[in-house]
Amino acid sequence: MTPDGFFRIVDTLVDVERSEGRDYSSFSVRGKRFGYYWPRTRTVGLKQTLSEQQALVSERPQVFEEQFTAGGFGWVVVYLDGIDADELGELVFEAWRLSAPESLLAEVPDRGQ
């Protein structure tokens, strides 16, 4: 997966705000953070459930690593070189969904999650 491919996935989501830091970009939906991108390492950080975080890291540690846990969620680092567009799209949508308010979720198709 390429960084441009990641950005295309993010651009399909509703109400995403992008902020540029010195070393990374962050992504939020209505003020709640759901992801990061670090160009130097070609990695993405995504919000997930704790169980999904553990499953991803244990199944494919060459692609995923535990980033941190906060507020009952587990964040994962995703190495873009090790993931395809479909799987990344599912993970990005899930990260967005975990952060989006209920009122917005009611307006957006479920994508089969």
Image (tube, grey):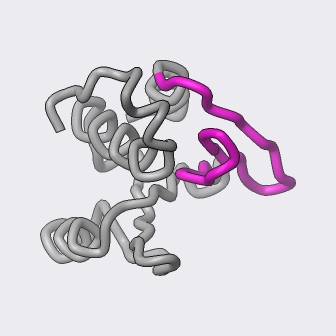
Front in this rendered view, residue 98 or 77 = 98
Q: Residue furthest right?
A: 22
Q: Could you say where residue 98 lies in the image, as x and y percent from the top left? A: 41, 52
Q: Could you say where residue 62 lies in the image, as x and y percent from the top left? A: 27, 67
Residue 98 lies, with reference to residue 11, above or below; the image says below
Question: Left or right of 109: which side holds 60?
Answer: left
Residue ID at (48%, 25%): 13
In magenta stretch: residue 52: no
Front in this rendered view, residue 113 or 106 = 106
Residue ID at (41%, 55%): 79
Q: In this picture, which residue range is highlighted in magenta?
A: 13-37
Q: Could you say where residue 30 lies in the image, as x and y percent from the top left? A: 65, 40
Residue 42 lies, with reference to residue 102, above or below; the image says below
Question: Left or right of 84: which side holds 42?
Answer: right
Residue 90 lies, with reference to residue 95, above or below; the image says above
Front in this rendered view, residue 102 or 43 = 102
Main secondary structure along the magenta-highlighted residues: strand
Q: Could you say where residue 89 lies in the image, as x and y percent from the top left? A: 32, 34
